[in-house]
Amino acid sequence: MGTTLAGGAVAPPARTEREEMRVSEEPGNQTPDTPDVSETELRGKSVDELRELAKEHEVSGSSGMKKDELVQALAETLQGLASGEGGGAGGGGEDADDVGPGPDGGHVRTGPDTSRSLKYSQEVTSPDDEPERAGRSLVTTSHEVIKQWAEDRGGRPATVEGTEHDDHLGVLRLDFGDQDDRLTPVTWDEWFETFDARRLNFIYQEERKDGKQSNFFRLESPDREDG
């Protein structure tokens, strides 16, 4: 309630410290539904500081985000924590924008037909893992690693038309925009659901031996020779 002044006028109630803070921050907050988060403060940080903060709050895929994306993801994550929702950016579920390590934690799947190339590949379980050297063969089952690797190269999840059976996807591929009419786009959720159901491993390269970016990858099953 306000204070009664001389002449009967009522002064507006004094703002609390929290309300004063929110008023001062409003001009820098352009993210809907995040009234308690200061984007002004976030935008004042360097990309490295934002990535460190994102890592602290377990924001998925932050290592591949640009500054504006980091600010947006952090604002949403911090707002979720403030409202008690928890989880990372996107509400904590595994959707097209928020993927995790997958059911095997990114670790290699082995079986009776595990190939020699898989045995000699470096296991990667997180986007923070670095290749031991340029041209190194890598392997992972991490949804986060695969999605980031593909999107860094303009790749999108796809399946080969005509190879599907019943209601199941056919052969899994990544579409790098090569105008291959045989590729049918699918969602990341569909792609990863099939990837995990078939117990596939993702063998790939970050760079070629000459240091240039590599688009090489292949999917392999340790349970059958045809992968």
Image: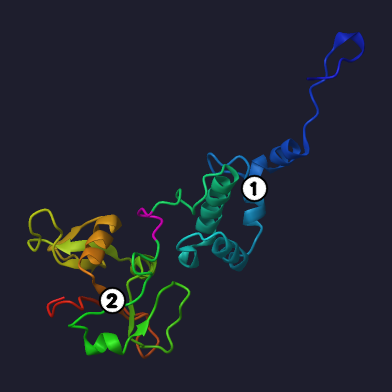
Q: Could you say where residue 12 lies in the image, as x and y percent from the top left?
A: 79, 22
Classed neighbour count for the residue bearing mark 1: other residues with Cα under 10 Å, few (<14), some (14–19), many (≥20): many
Which element type, helix, strand or loop, lies under badge 1? loop
Q: Could you say where residue 79 lies in the image, as x and y percent from the top left?
A: 57, 46
Q: The magenta stretch spans which residues?
A: 94-99
Which element type, helix, strand or loop, lies under badge 2? loop
Number of marks drawn:
2
Give the residue drawn at x 14%, y 77%. 224
Does 113 appear above or below 22? below
Q: Name the residue under label 2.
A: 109
Q: Could you say where residue 208 lies in the image, as x and y percent from the top left?
A: 34, 86
Q: Could you say where residue 216 lies in the image, as x and y percent from the top left?
A: 28, 79
Give the residue drawn at x 72%, y 36%. 19
Regarding residue 175, the answer to whether it shows in the image is: yes
49 or 89, nearer to the observer: 89
First along the sequence among labels 2 and 1? 1
Q: Mark 1 points at which residue?
A: 38
Q: In which quarter of the image is residue 179?
A: bottom left
Q: Could you tell whether 25 is left or right of 68 in the image?
A: right
Q: Could you tell whether 171 is left or right of 109 in the image?
A: left
Does 194 appear above or below 23? below
What amino acid is found at the position of numbered circle 1 in the picture? Ser
Does 144 appear above or below 32? below
Quarter of the image that includes the N terminus: top right
